[in-house]
Image: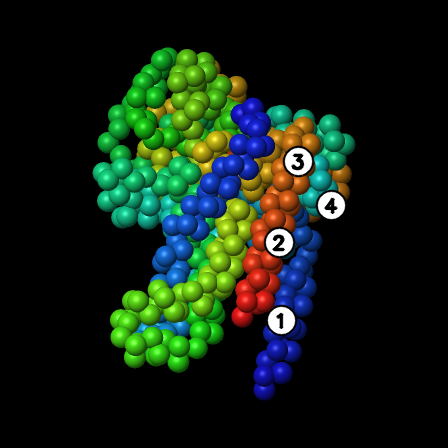
Amino acid sequence: MRERLARLLAAFILFLPAVASAGHTVTVFAASSMKEALDDLARQFETATGHRIFVSYLGSNAHARQIEAGAPAEVFISADADWIDYVVAQGRAVPDSRRELVRNELVLVAPARSDVALSIAPGFPLKAALADKRLAIANPDVVPAGKYAKAALQSLGVWEGVKDRLAPGESVRAALAFVAAGAAPLGIVYRTDALAERSVKILGKFPPRSHPPIVYSLVLMKRANQAARVFAEFVASPKAQATWWKHGFITDPERASDR
Amino acid sequence: MPPIGELDVVLLSLKVAFWAVAASLPAAIATGFVLARKDFPGKTLFDAAVHLPLVLPPVVVGFALLGLFGPQGPIGRWLEPLGIVFAFRWTGAALASAIMAFPLMVRAVRLAIESVDTRLESAGRTLGANRARVFITVTLPLAWPGVVTGAILAFARSLGEFGATITFVSSIPGETQTLPLAIYTFTQVPGQDAHVMRLCVLAVLLSLAALAASEWLMRRGAARG
């Protein structure tokens, strides 16, 4: 009896991948901030085509380093141009497959129950608002969201005051989690992250001119199969725009100022 | 972040691991004793709860700590007015390490106490010593090699703690960035490969030292027994 159970279990484990991979599979490395929107699009694509989409969400820097080490990604979506440049320079990407996908904005968030009132302006009292606590932010040296946040704080002249009071996350979603749990009283994340997490509220939006434009780009890896190419077309197509828009991403920079 | 000195990272790791073990050792001895010698309703459940960190994904422990011990968490909210803060402090890294290493310590202590002959304890009792005195003068000295082994094992586990720590207290250089966190953080930065390599070598050396120490103590214990 016991032996039979063990055999059944072994068979189940061995054949699980075979069952799951009817049709082609595509491995996508995407910026962690795209989680909800890209999951949504991947489901739509799977239903329409029968292909399977596997998406890994991490800080774009981590993905770029993994691709450098030979990770089997077929599509790479980065939250900034630097990490696309990086994989292109490694010779692992198809350079002319590179395209701009969507844009995003940077916001200051607090736990939903917080009563902090703070408006973003040059020299605004960010350090005082933190008191003895820390500002949750993606790692400002390498993670795109952290680099944008650092640039914004520098141009507003408040970086020097808070650079030693950071709680750096390995991705923007790690920073978001610190604020959502109430461990950090303030954090800087993308607007889309704040919309996806009900435990945080947006205190204010950073002026677009305070940081480089937040542009997500996609590039195909040299190992990409046909299904990966079709998926790349799909997420950049007009059909996908409504989904991006629904999750708060900006597909048309002209309309950004409407909100 | 400019790479801060490797020595600072090692010293911080040692500090975190030392306090993780030192602060939880009394509780581990008490828990090990209870599991070895006492029977009570719900013991199986208690045993399972003690062992939970051994089998749970570390990130779950880290997330639970973040929720409970954050400044707005049900425990953190009470501790903060007393000046006890864990969030994003090295003390939080020690707490995470202590919880992850606790089952290892308890297991070693429990085995050691179980192997102590209860007749020796009874003899102590008939000679007029109360339970506490018997524990301190008979049980604990006989179980001591096992306790030390457990403590060293827990120390080594604490040096390697990653998932619960980064989830709970982030990776702040000089505050919570212990050896594994520093290695992880620098693997994500191009051009830091040499730095990463040096940190990896240090991690190997530290782990070997801890293993050698526990081996030596175990042999010494065996030779005595």
**Spot occupied by residue B47 in the image (x, y as percentages of width and height):** 40, 69
Residue A194: image tag? none
Q: Mark 3 sits on what residue?
A: B198
Quarter of the figure with the C terminus of chain B: bottom right
Q: Amino acid at mark 4?
A: Asn
Whether the residues at callouts 3 and 2 have beta carbons within 8 Å, the answer is no
Give the CA distance from mark 3 to mark 2.
Answer: 21 Å
Residue B212: image tag? 2
On the same chain: label 3 and label 2?
A: yes
Pointer 1 chain = A
Is B75 situated above or below A247? below
Q: Mark 1 sits on what residue?
A: A12
Res. A48 in view: no
> Dividing the picture into quarters, in which one does residue B214 lie?
bottom right
Q: Amino acid at mark 2?
A: Ala
Q: Earlier in the sequence, mark 3 or mark 2?
A: 3
